[in-house]
């Protein structure tokens, strides 16, 4: 007998920071969640004042109120997957780690945001070690770019495929079960290759490099796309591959936007 029940829509939660220009942060996450068939919820840990040229200020939510947002939400709403984005400072990292532990939230995608493409710092330097020790072991997947992987490992950015493979393995050894090490900051003019690694081995995911200066929100969009898709796909690898295809589409469409005079957002 055919069921006429609607398929259950997954609930995705982003714990991240506001970008008023709409290209990155919470705003990008909610757009990707909606576009990919998830119901979006959001806990804000900080606000930025920013446009496409840069960040002029960061205002952090008091830790007790971050905890209260999570506690109140999950007391009522089932959460199927979680994305962790920009966390600003060490107190926020600790508060979010405690909330994840308290509620045993499933399918956590950790985007270890540190520095914006504009060059502005989005995570204080002293918080990096805490991301490594407190948050990495709670994540199902971590999605660093080349500089973020290097910072987490306290080394310099990988320059060759062999170095990328070694750093991804070193991240696994820190207690996270899956790593997507993103190659977008690499210098290959034709291709953007990311390395996906889990207990079954490593796999390069390749996509043509899209020639656009409008790349604001690329990392946020990819990690939130994975979060939206994970409950709708049989495994992490498939969710990651489909999310990368979605990001390639958003980069391809970026030039159709006319938002700001700096590095404009991807379009999705
Ligand atoms: N602002 C916020 C709130 C973010 O979360 C991020 C990235 O995660 C950025 C800005 C930086 O985005 P991008 O480096 O893509 O410009």
Image: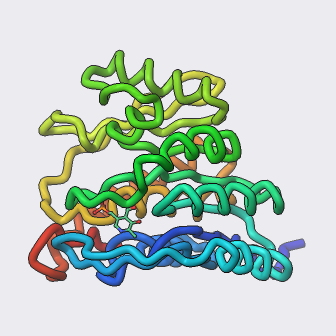
Q: Quadrant of residue 218?
A: bottom left
Q: How many marks?
A: 0
Q: Residue at x 53, y 29 (%)?
A: 171
Tell me how the rendering is colored.
rainbow
Between residue 143 and residue 201, name the one nearer to us: 143
125 up-or-down from 268: above or below: above
Q: Residue at x 68, y 40 (%)?
A: 137
55 displayed left or right of 39: left
Image location of residue 61, percent across then percent down: 55, 77
145 displayed left or right of 84: left
Between residue 267 and residue 133, name the one nearer to us: 133
Q: Tell me the quarter of the image containing the N terminus.
A: bottom right
Q: Tell me the quarter of the image containing the C terminus.
A: bottom left
253 up-or-down from 207: above or below: below
Q: In the rendered image, is residue 15 in sight?
A: yes
Between residue 257 and residue 90, name the one nearer to us: 90
223 displayed left or right of 49: right
Q: Residue at x 44, y 24 (%)?
A: 167
Q: Residue at x 48, y 44 (%)?
A: 128
26 up-or-down from 171: above or below: below
Image location of residue 2, percent across then percent down: 84, 73
Image location of residue 229, percent across then percent down: 59, 60
Image location of residue 71, percent across then percent down: 79, 75
């Amino acid at each position: 007998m055919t069921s006429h029940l609607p398929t259950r829509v997954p609930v995705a939660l982003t714990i991240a920071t506001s970008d008023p220009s709409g290209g990155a942060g919470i705003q990008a996450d909610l757009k990707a969640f909606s576009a990919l068939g998830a119901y979006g919820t959001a806990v804000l840990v900080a606000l930025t004042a920013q446009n496409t040229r840069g960040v002029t200020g960061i205002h952090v939510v008091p830790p007790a109120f971050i905890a209260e947002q999570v506690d109140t939400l999950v007391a009522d709403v089932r959460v199927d997957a979680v994305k962790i984005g920009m966390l600003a400072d060490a107190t926020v990292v600790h508060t979010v780690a405690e909330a994840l532990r308290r509620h045993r939230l499933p399918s956590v995608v950790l985007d270890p945001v540190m520095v914006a493409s504009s060059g502005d710092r989005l995570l204080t330097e002293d918080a990096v070690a805490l991301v490594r020790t407190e948050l990495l072991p709670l994540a199902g997947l971590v999605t660093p770019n080349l500089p973020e992987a290097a910072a987490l490992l306290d080394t310099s950015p990988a320059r060759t495929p062999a170095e990328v493979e070694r750093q991804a393995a070193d991240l696994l050894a820190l207690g996270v079960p899956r790593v997507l090490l993103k190659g977008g900051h690499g210098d290959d003019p034709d291709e953007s290759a990311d390395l996906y690694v889990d207990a079954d081995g490593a796999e390069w995911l390749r996509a043509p490099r899209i020639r656009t200066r409008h790349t604001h929100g690329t990392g946020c969009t990819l990690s939130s796309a994975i979060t939206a898709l994970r409950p709708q796909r049989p495994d992490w690898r498939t969710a990651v591959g489909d999310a990368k295809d979605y990001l390639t589409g958003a980069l391809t469409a970026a030039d159709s936007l006319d938002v700001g005079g700096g590095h404009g957002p991807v379009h999705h």
